[in-house]
Image (cartoon, grey):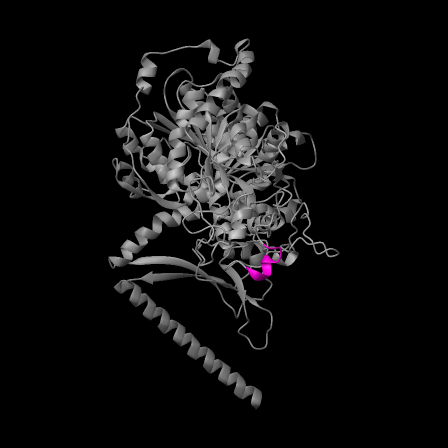
Amino acid sequence: MAERSFKEEVQKLRLSEGEIFRGEGILAVTKALLESGVAYVAGYQGAPISHLMDVLADAQDILADYGIHFESSASEATAAATLAASVNYPLRGAASFKSTVGTNVASDALANLASGGVTGGALIIVGEDYGEGSSIMQERSHAFAMKSQIWLLDPRPNLPSIVSAVKTGFELSEASNTPVMLQLRIRACHVHGHFVAGRNRSPRFTLREAMEQPRRDTARIVLPPASFAHEQEKVLARWPSAVRFIREHGLNERFGPGGRRVLAAGEATGLGQVVDAQAAQAALCIGIITQGGHYNTLMRVLLNLGLADLFGRSAVPIHVMNVSYPVLEEEIADFCTHRRAILLVEEGQPNFLEQNIAAILRARGSGCALHGKDMLPVAGEYTAAALLAGLRCFLEEHGVLPVDSRRTMQPHGWPEVPGDRPHEDRATGMPRAPSRVIALHPEAVVHNRPPGFCTGCPERPIFTAMKLLERELGPHHVAADIGCHLFSILPPFNLGNTTMGYGLGTASAAAMNVQAGKRVISVMGDGGFWHNGLTSGVANAVFNRSSNVTLIVDNSYTSATGGQDILSSKTANPTRSTGHAIEQAVRGVGVSWVRTVTHTYNLKSMMDALRQALRSTEPGPKVVVAQSECMLNLQRRERPQLRRRLAAGERVVRERFGVDADTCTGDRACIRLSGCPSLTIRSNPDPLRTEPVATVVESCVGCGLCGEVAHAAALCPSFYRASIVSHPSAWDRLRQRLRNAVIAWLQRRDAARSARWSIGESV
């Protein structure tokens, strides 16, 4: 089951023309696909577009009403290859996945698609996972778009702009016979707003027609000599067609003086300030070029500097590049004409746009100064604080704001920005150029908050077992993989030497396929296994006669991306085939030594399976499949049922664990080998003991690992299990009365015995 259900929200997709659609960005994208007459959609989940896949899955009945086929693909490469249906046929198709890792996986299919070109519109919706909310290496989709000459759209993050980008993306693709990439950042995916809905359309040409009337054009296949002609076609035909379409349809926008939204001198801003006439005049001599995705942040900063209002009107000319690639030379040159300086807001590295625009200005002999990474951070996300510091430097240097603006015009509600000082020469008192990099003082850096396993996660005992086994057999090289299990590289486990990509855990240990005193342990999840690991990892190990160990974490879902179903999921999916065992798959490619542990919380079983794998003398790869359902999905399924039973007055038993503070020694071995968020410490209730004792807080889900760890580590007797009974039966009450009576009798007996000892000692 997915992290979130959109069963109710997807009904908005049925809105007809003229009605107002209100909702989230991902819902707007789906509605735009319906209004574009798309024939098929495919994709692979991953932040920040995981919910887009969930919406499409929940809206399959609506999609079917319009003859739209939806595929939940096995990988990003599978999703991208699906777009082959648009090569020979006038079929509009879309594929969606996380970028840049997803784009890397899909690169073979995308490169072939871009080389041969398309007949129908092909739209690639990528979730640009860059910045503070990212979980991957910091790269951009821009490089891939340039490399394969795929046009890149980066719309302003509001629903009308996103919907328009989807529709015009298909039109641009068809006009230039080129696939188009639509880039959506995290905030764009989850922004809320409204737009006027259009009419949902069925595809003009259907998949059934394509299958019954096959077409073939060898010029579209990447095979010599056609492949050599493709490069010429890109430059001589497709590029000019794309430029013409972008210019004629006004995909890039301008605001401020000379644009659509102008804030005039003397007009009040959203902060109650009035635009100074001198500042407004100075602003006419400068300009800002920004990627569409940064428009909202830029306007927020201008608002707080008193140069824009709440309605998007600006005193500074702004050129918004909703199309980041290709760059339209005429538009850039026209915007820079008669301007003294331009600030380019381009996030990340390399600075592709800055280099491109600098070359355009140089070739035309323009005297306009181009600023970018000299005033804005060279790398990292362009948050409002980062933009505020750089934009103020730019405006001060070119006379729009006074150099002492920090003291006379402190923006309302903004924190002090490190490194944000007037750029002033101390000797002359005159403004000087800012440094290349805006330095961050250590005190302004947010403390690291590394990710960790959820409470009750079934993967925690797996790595606890590995850590305990390390005491017995010594440390091993651990080849890690992408997924929740990657958290094992952090404390308290400190396992994992490398990670090379999704499903590549076993493949990354291939170089260490030699005879040695120890074996390498490779880790991969069930999602990574079906994505890439079966062929590139397990089958490769069989083929090359590796004797290393592969540990497959089978929690029944792609948990790290939101809990979507996969081939080995045990839940019955009404539209997908599930229940295919991983053990059968690995045996099918030739692995003979396989052990499946069906309950990972049993540390003894986990340790025994790993110990056997590491000590086995049988040739060939060893595979251990560790099974237990993802606790988040388990709780999502069981808690609603629990609430309904409690509301109905039914008897409900919940398991909880605790620590007897009088027995706990305070050595905290249970915490060192678990790291569970519900297991912590508290002050010792014994006034004669100062050592803190372990305790279990209310977030405990009763998995039992803490007790298992304690017994495995130190035979600790302080853990206990308690059963919380709601709406107890008559038998429950009778048993409790008997327990209370027995306990009371034992307490009286102990008290009498203690009294006799006290009397004897006094005598």
Can residue 411 be seen by looking at this rendering?
yes
Residue drawn at point x = 53 percent, y = 62 percent: 680
The single residue placed furthest to the bottom in the displayed view is 763
Residue 274 spot, x, y in % from top left: 47, 56
Magenta segment: 402-409
Between 69 and 187, the one nearer to me in the picture = 187
Between 498 and 506, the one nearer to me in the picture = 498
Up the image or down, 714 lies above or below 343; here it is below
The single residue placed furthest to the right in the displayed view is 427
Q: In which quarter of the image is the C terminus?
A: bottom right
Q: In which quarter of the image is the N terminus?
A: top left
Between 151 and 266, the one nearer to me in the picture = 266
Residue drawn at point x = 38 percent, y = 72 percent: 742
Between 657 and 431, the one nearer to me in the picture = 431
Can residue 79 be seen by looking at this rendering?
no
Residue 315 spot, x, y in % from top left: 49, 47
Total numbered circles: 0
Residue drawn at point x = 57 percent, y = 87 percent: 761
Up the image or down, 641 lies above or below 236; here it is below
Residue 156 spot, x, y in % from top left: 44, 40
Residue 626 spot, x, y in % from top left: 49, 40
Up the image or down, 749 lies above or below 349; here it is below
Please say whether residue 709 is one of the residues in the magenta stretch. no
